[in-house]
Every structure is written in C-alpha cells, then in structure tokens.
Amino acid sequence: MNNQLSQGDRAFKYVSLLPLLVLLLVLAMLPLAGLAKMSLSDVRIVSGRQTMSFVGLKNYREVLHDPVFLQSFRNTLVYVFFSVVIEVSLGLFLSLKINSLKKMTIFYRTVLLIPFLIPPVVNGTMWKLILNPQFGLLNKGLTALGLPPQSILSDERFALAGIMIVTVWQWVGYNMLILYAGLQTIPDSIIEAAQIDGCGRTGMLFKIIIPLIMPILFIALVFRMIHAFKGFDLFYVLTGGGPGNATEIINTYTQKVFMTQQRMGYGSALSLITIFVILVLFFVLQYVVNRRSDAS
Amino acid sequence: MKRILHIGMIVLIMIIGTMALFASGTDEAEPTAEPVIICINESPWLPAFRELSKAYEEQTGIPVDIRAFPFKTMSERGLSATTSKESEFDLITMNESMCAKFYADGLVTPLREIDPNFTMDSAFLTYDGLNCWDEEKQYPSVTGEPYSLPVNGNIQIFYYRKDLYDKAGLSAPETWDDVKAACRIISERNPGIYPYAVRGQKGHMALGWDFYPYLRGFGGDIFKDAPRDFTVVLDTPEALEALTFYADLALNYSPPGVSTVGQSEQIALLAGGQLLQTIVVAGANAQMDDPKKSAVPGQIAYTVVPRPANGVHAVHTGVLSMGIPHNIDDARKRRAYEFLTWFTSQESQQFFAENGGVPVRSDAMDSKGMDSLRFLDAIKMSQDALVAYPRIPCWPRIDEVIESRLSEVVSGITTPKEALAIMQDEITAIVKDEGLL
C-alpha cells in the first residue's frame, strides 16, 4: 500500500503527523528533560525562586549508596513480581470457572469486578480497618474461632505480603475480565476436537487454552506489571512504608524525598531511575511478546 | 422567505433572552467579599478552628475558605503553593519542623512588611521564637523578625483514666515508674484495657515526636547544642536508657501491632475506653468529654508528661503557625493579616479554647470562666518543661531516619542499641552533607 503512494502523498502523511509529534514532544519529552536537568543539579529555593547548580552525577552516585533506596528497590521488585503473578494466575482460574458456567456468568463477573471499581485509597482505608490489630474485623473473626490475633501490617515479615493480598484482591477481577474475554475468542470447535482426541483437563489448559489466549495473557501481564510498578496509594494508606522500611517502595520513597524533604535534585534522580526501570521492563516484555508472535 | 423569518425570530428571541438573563443577574448579584483561603491540616482541633472562622465570617462578612489536608501532606501543599507563580492560599499552616524552611527560603511574608506597626504583646506564647526568623543565626528565635503567628498551642499532655486510677487508689502519675506501676496494677484488674500505647506508626514527626520527651527527660538529646553545635549525641548512655524504656513500653505494655497505632488510633482507643493512659496532643481533649464521641466522658484526666525518677519533665511542642505566602498580591496579604491578627486576639483565643482549641495566649488561658477547661491546667503545668526538635530546614531528612529506625525498635526488628548506632551514623552523614557539621 505504501508503495502505491506518490511522493507528495508520503510527504503529506508525515506533515500530518507533525502536530501530534510536536504535542507529544512538548507533553512528554520536555518534562522529562526538565527532570533530567534537575537530577544533575542541586536544586534550592532562594527567596521563593528555584535555583539550580550543576553537580554532575552526584545525585546518581548517592542513589547507589542509599540503603533506603536499595531496600525500596528490592521491595518494589518483590511486590511487582508476586502480586502480578498471583493475581493473573487467580484471574485465569476464575475466568476458566466462569467460562464453564451455564448460568449467572454476568452476576459472578460483576461481583468479582467490584473491588477493581473501588478507588484505591478507599480500598486501603477499608483494609486498614479490617486488618487493624485492636479492633479489626480479621482479629475479631480469629478470636471468635479461638485463634490468636494477628498483626499483619505491623510485622516486618508479613507487612509486604499483607499489601500484596490487598492488591490481588483489588485487581483479580480486572484480570479475570480480560482473560475471560480471551477465552470467548476460542472457537468451541477447537475445544470439542481436543475433547474427541482424548485431551484431559490439564492438557486442554496447557496445550490448547493457554497458547490460544497467550497474546491476551501477555497484555494482562504487561499492563499489570507497569501499573504495579507505579503503586503508591495502598502503601501510603496502609503502612506509610513501615514498619521500619519493610514496605517502603521506590514511589513512596521518591515522594518523601521530593515533597517532604524537598530534595528535588536527588528526587529527580530517583524518578528517572524508576522511569528507566519501567521502560526496560516494558521493552523486554515487548521483545518477548514479539518473539512469541513471530514464532507462532 | 417565511423560513428565514422564523429562524430570524428565534435568534432574536434567544439574544433578547440571554441579555435579559445577564441583566437580571447583574441587578440581583450582591457584591461578594473575597474569601480568605486557608491551607490547614486535618486535626483534633480543626472543629474549634472552624467554629472560630464562622464567628469571623459573622463579624466581618468575609468568607473563610478552609482547605484541610492530612498532616503529612499539609506542608507539601504549602510548599507547592508558595513556590508556584501565585499561591492558591492566603494563609498557610506550618508545622514546627517546616517553619525554618519557609522563613529561610523567603516563602512567607514578614508580618512587618504588611503592617510596619505590628508587634506581639507579652501575652503571646512564642514557643521559643517559633514564629520569628533570625537571619543572622539562620534559626527561629525571639530576636528575629516575625514571619508568622502561632495559631494552635498544641503541646503533649498526659491523658489517663482517672476513674481507674482512683479505684486502684493511685494519684496522678509524676514519674514513669508511677506509670508502669499503674500499668501493672490496673491491667490486672481490667484485662480488657490496654495499659499504654506509644505512637508507633511511622510518619512525619509522629513516632520520633512521641519519643523525644523520653529522650530529653532521661537527659539525652539528638544534637550536642543545636543550633550552635550539631554533633550527634545519640550514642550516650542517657539516649540508650530512654530508648530502652520506650521500647519496653511499646513491646510489653502497648497494644499488639503497635507500629500501626498512630495519633488517631491513640485518641480512638482513649475515647473508646480501651486505653488506660498515653501521651497525646492537648488538642485531642475536645473528644474526651463529648458523649457523642467518647465512651468514657468525664473519666479522662490530664497532667504534665511524667518524668524519669531521676530525670526531668520534658514536653514536646507541636505548635502550628500560620504565615502569609510571599507570592500573593497586597490586598490578599492584608486580608490574610487581618484574619490572623483577629484570630490570635485574646477574645478569639478564649472562644477557641472553649471549643477545644489550644490557645496561644496566656491571657486567654487565665480569662474568667476558663477554669472548667481541665486540660488547660496540664498545659500551664507544662510551660516550664517545653522542648522542641531543632528547627532547621533539613529536619525532614533527619526526621525520616528517626521515624524509620524507631519504627524498627517498636516492631522488635532492631534493638535500641543497634537503632541508636545507626541513627548516630545516618544523622551525622546528613548534617555533614547539609554543611551543619
């Protein structure tokens, strides 16, 4: 099709794209360039005005020796990996179950989607009350069953896991919906043919269903991973990064450095590192998806 | 032709209708006074502030637009507003640790720039010059230029269940030994009540703020002699004794999961009748005697923060001060100034106290009819014991270290000795980096 366009048409095509390109540059690249400049500077406020003095890579060198950042980075990776893997697996399981139902599929889909519709801050507050060690619903239930009360969010061993549970609860419905849509695209004839050929349940899942919905599964994974990397609200509401720094993640730490401590140069370096990590993750996943598509 | 006439008529009617609407709007509109827009924190004393603001609106006809944010984000909002082209707020509330930053960076207007005749009379409680900035010393000091006015004289006071103390034959606790004795005696008789609750939740000026009176009471401190000498002195036996005592209260007397207990949880436990005693800000008093909010109205008593048997009383101030942004026009500055000076007058402060606020004037505390406000006695008793964190612009960096390490101690992750050693190193690195050492 491209070859059929005249030179003038081709030029027009690029000129038409130019306004959008300029807009993208202004909206995305300029703030990033500003952030990059700040990350190489010592930023101070003098008489109500921002001043910057160039410090080279000082802020980046400091990042490598900052124990809180290193712990935040590790916590972020653990949080993203486990919460996304669990919620996508659970989403797949639920979508398969709902897909196999003859009745009430709309009801189950709607109910499972409710946590996703609740704003994250409200979710966090609700779970904070449920998990409250003194008057929370969880401990009331445990005590009624004769079990010892738990302090999940105040125990450094379980606090991050507690936030992951809330995250999974919030996002599992979304994953279920995406994967359910994927399951709907599988023609019945393929399933029936596999059944006639004597394919068992496990074989059906791993050899037929998952390969067929793989593109959608990857979309769900990529989207959720990027979103989980941007996590903030649940951590902010549930633990504030504590106990100690057990639930400090890159975003909560950057917010403190940038906003509370007003160390804007250092905070910019942290922000750029976060953006870089997300971009690397995105390109790696995109590369994997493309390779799989090419292979298939 | 007929159709064109019809369309013309419709357009004409629409134009006349619109003009009539605008005209009647202009006739009926009453001149509205510009509001005073205030950035403030959500707090136990906010209802009292609202009541007083309503009184201002009634007296002057000037609306007061209160925009309340969580304590953690209030300073961020203030900083954001004062570093933008024009502040959205006419008045910003600053906590103690942030005042120095606002003054040093020129983000708030010196009050004498708005009113050259401004003076503070002797009844004003200045909390060691919190509202003034000494350019030469680069530190808040009574010798400096006034940049703000304190609006709520919040300090720590000790809340305890007087009914349970009385039943056990105990008098108001004077020392920490008295407190621990009460913990043991009363909790044996009342197993459903938590004997104590430290403020274990990590935040901004939360856990560290709660610990500071113990540190000072036991004879320790963070710096050798701030603002003259910023050598960190958390490696002393006094600091270790204080933190060991605090850790004991957290791990053996406080509710399970104490690292999730913040100020609001402390207040809820007290008002719910589930907590025997603790240190909370004076501003929480209004909720204790209100039958709608308290399960134990009239049963909570107040006293000065106890001292170690061989130590001194130390009471951390938690005063909030209001300043006028540098980046608003003169009319807005004047409007904000009028509100601020009215708010801090004797009469207003008396009304503020009657509604649960903590006055910033001694004459308001001593006024006639204030005897019924029991918490004021504890405040008066505490005046000679007031201490405060060093008010330096880089405090939020140091605060982050203190909050994290103390959070580890109250969660049992690290020992007091380990935590103090880490804090010693980390805070030393910060003050060196900031050029203070």
Image: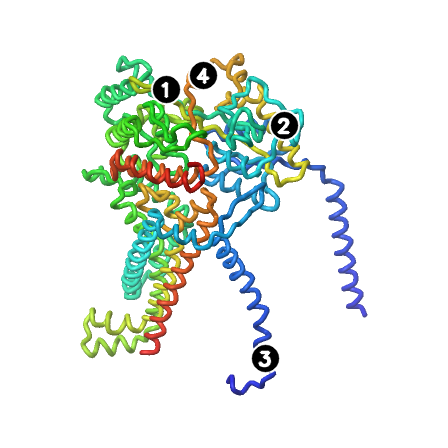
Q: Which of marks 4 and 2 is in front?
A: 4
Q: Can residue A281 be seen in this view?
A: yes
What residue is shown with label 3? A11
What residue is shown with label 1? B313
Q: Report which quarter residue B324 is drawn in.
A: top right
Q: What residue type is labelled 3?
A: Ala
Q: Which mark is residue B380?
A: 4
Mark 1 surroundings within 10 Å by alpha-carbon count, few (fewer than 14), some (14 through 19), many (20 or more): many
> Residue, x 34% and y 53% (percent of image)?
A73
Q: Are marks 2 and 3 in contact (CB under 8 Å)?
A: no
> Residue, x 24% and y 73% (percent of image)?
A207
What residue is shown with label 2? B58
Q: Nearer the viewer, mark 2 or mark 3?
A: 3
Q: Which chain carries label 2?
A: B
Is B436 placed left or right of B234 in the picture?
Answer: right
Is B224 placed left or right of B345 in the picture?
Answer: left
Q: What residue type is labelled 1?
A: His
- The span from disc 4 to disc 1 (Cα, nearest Å) is 13 Å
Labels 4 and 3 positioned on one and the same chain: no
